[in-house]
Amino acid sequence: MFSKILVPVDLDAPEVAAKAMATARRIAATEGAGILVISVTPDPKDPEKEAALEARLKAYIDGERGELEMDGILNLGGSVAREVRAVAEEMGVDLVVMASHWPRLDDHLFGSRSASVALHSHCSVLVVR
């Protein structure tokens, strides 16, 4: 049913995505799917920061991979929800598995990133709390 799963991860707080990654790993193992990890940071392109973030993303993936097919994408200078949706469509993702958080006041006013991804994505979205 699923062949490619996208998991957004904040490299500054990877523990937030731990349940989402565990869920994606179980689904991928069952379905024989690959996992694509995306990290989006609002910082504009800076070669020094980019190299450090790429290394952190690689280390994160190496720690999570196990026997699964897993790759990563780092996007700098964009909106998290918009970049997740764009990469999901561009890469032919079947499922986005992402973490949720307890809503803040601005989430009630403007909506959360996970709500935006779920509402506007072309594929299935599983939000894990």
Image: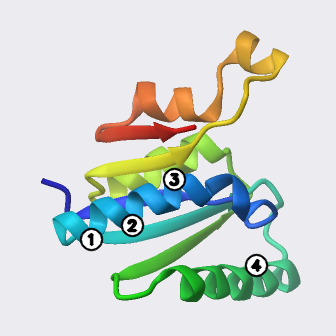
Front disc: 4 or 2: 2
Disc 3 target residue: 20
Q: Give whichever of 92, 104 is nearer the camera.
A: 104
Residue carrying label 2: 25
Give left or right: position of 85 versus 9. left
Q: In the image, what residue type sits under mark 1?
A: Ala
Comparing marks 4 and 3, which lies closer to the viewer?
3
Say which label, 2 or 3, has the lower sequence index.
Answer: 3
Q: Quadrant of residue 118?
A: top left
- How many angstroms separate mark 4 from mark 2 (CA)? 23 Å
Above-or-below relation of 89 to 57? above
Of 112 and 42, which appears nearest the observer? 112
Which residue appears at 87% of the width and 85% of the height? 48
Provide the secondary structure element on which disc 3 rests. helix
Residue 12: horizontal and vertical position, in percent? Answer: 81, 64
User: In the figure, 49 relative to 36: above or below?
Assistant: below
Residue 37 seen by the camera = yes
**In the rendered structure, are the residues bearing label 1 and label 4 in contact, judged by CB atoms less than 8 Å apart?**
no
Under tag 2, what secondary structure?
helix
Say which residue label 4 marks.
53
Q: Which residue is mark 1?
A: 29
User: Are circles 1 and 2 on residues that touch, CB within 8 Å?
Assistant: yes
| Among numbered discs 1 and 4, the one appearing first in the sequence | 1
- Residue placed furthest toward the left: 1
